[in-house]
Amino acid sequence: MAGPPSENEIFDACRVLFGPEISLSREFLYYLQASGARSAYRQRAKETHPDLFVGEDHRRQQERARLFRHLVDAFDIVNDFLIRRDEVAPMAPPPEPSGAPERKSPAPERRDPGEEAEEPRFHRGAVPGRNLEIGLYLFYRGAISYQDMIAALVWQRRQRPVIGEVALRWGWLSDAAIGRILAGGGQPGRFGDRAVDLGLLSPFQVKTLLFYQRCRQQRLGEFFIEGGLLTAAEMEQMVADLSEHNRRVSRASRNPRPAGAPAGG
């Protein structure tokens, strides 16, 4: 892409990627994660990929090809925005209310039992045979809707501190040093990698910052428990099921079945 996309272009791309029912704001863009964008793209691709409509009339195939191209363009715009947001010119966080105490990430709102989400999309079919993270696994198991998964990913990012701000607070970087890192001046890369390349942080310091960042980020499952979507016991069982799923996938990748060999035992 020649230049940064405009905010309206980013919002339009998000509507294509996440669906027209998504509630968009600058706060949504600030908290959106790359994993959420990739998940949205994969899900939409399953609905619009032209290969799914082979054998149908030519006009319908052309329409599906157009929709898929539109989806790819939308994903490129959102992905470009996320790279620029996180690595080139980070967005300022949404303003806190005047006089607000140090922010804790709000818990998700509980659903009113009589109020249903607008057109929730639940997965129908088998769980993909690849390693999955908990949000995607819950979606593919049919335990949560697609909208629930995206909302959880956005919620989770709210607790993740920016490592540059942490390094500044700890006295490891100055404002001027952060400016040098953000200025780039070469191949784009992650903040920590560029800081090491410039000799402003050691690899150990970057690992420490990333560890702190992960520790400050609540587990995704807490969103679904606090929101009343799953009980603690159900969440614990899903985590155990996910571990077993990923173990099976890993074993299968290490010991692929020879071509022509019968399945099973």
Image (cartoon, rainbow, N blue to C red):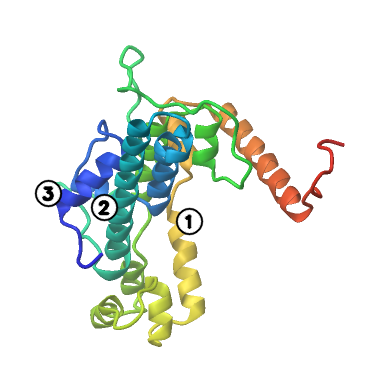
N-terminal-most mark, 3 or 1 = 3
N-terminal-most mark, 3 or 2 = 2
Instruction: Work out which residue is located at the far left of the displayed protein and give it.
Output: 98
Disc 2 target residue: 30
Task: Tell me if label 3 and label 1 are in contact, CB under 8 Å.
Answer: no
Residue 75 or 141: which is nearer the viewer?
A: 75
Task: Tell me if label 1 and label 2 are in contact, CB under 8 Å.
Answer: no
Quadrant placement of the C terminus: top right
Rounded to the nearest angstrom, the CA distance separating label 3 from label 2 is 20 Å
Disc 3 target residue: 98
Instruction: Work out which residue is located at the far top of the displayed protein and give it.
Output: 114
Quadrant placement of the N terminus: bottom left
Rendered residue at 38%/86% (across/down)? 198
Q: Which mark is residue 110?
A: none
Rounded to the nearest angstrom, the CA distance separating label 1 from label 2 is 20 Å
Q: Is residue 200 above or below residue 149?
A: below
The answer to whether residue 102 shows anywhere in this view is: no
Q: Amino acid at mark 3?
A: Ser
Q: Is residue 39 above or below residue 186?
A: above
Mark 3 surroundings: few (<14), some (14-19) or many (≥20) residues within 10 A: few
Q: Which mark is residue 215?
A: 1
**Image position, residue 215 (x, y; %):** 48, 56
Mark 2 surroundings: few (<14), some (14-19) or many (≥20) residues within 10 A: some
N-terminal-most mark, 1 or 2 = 2
Secondary structure under tag 2 reads helix
Q: Amino acid at mark 2?
A: Tyr
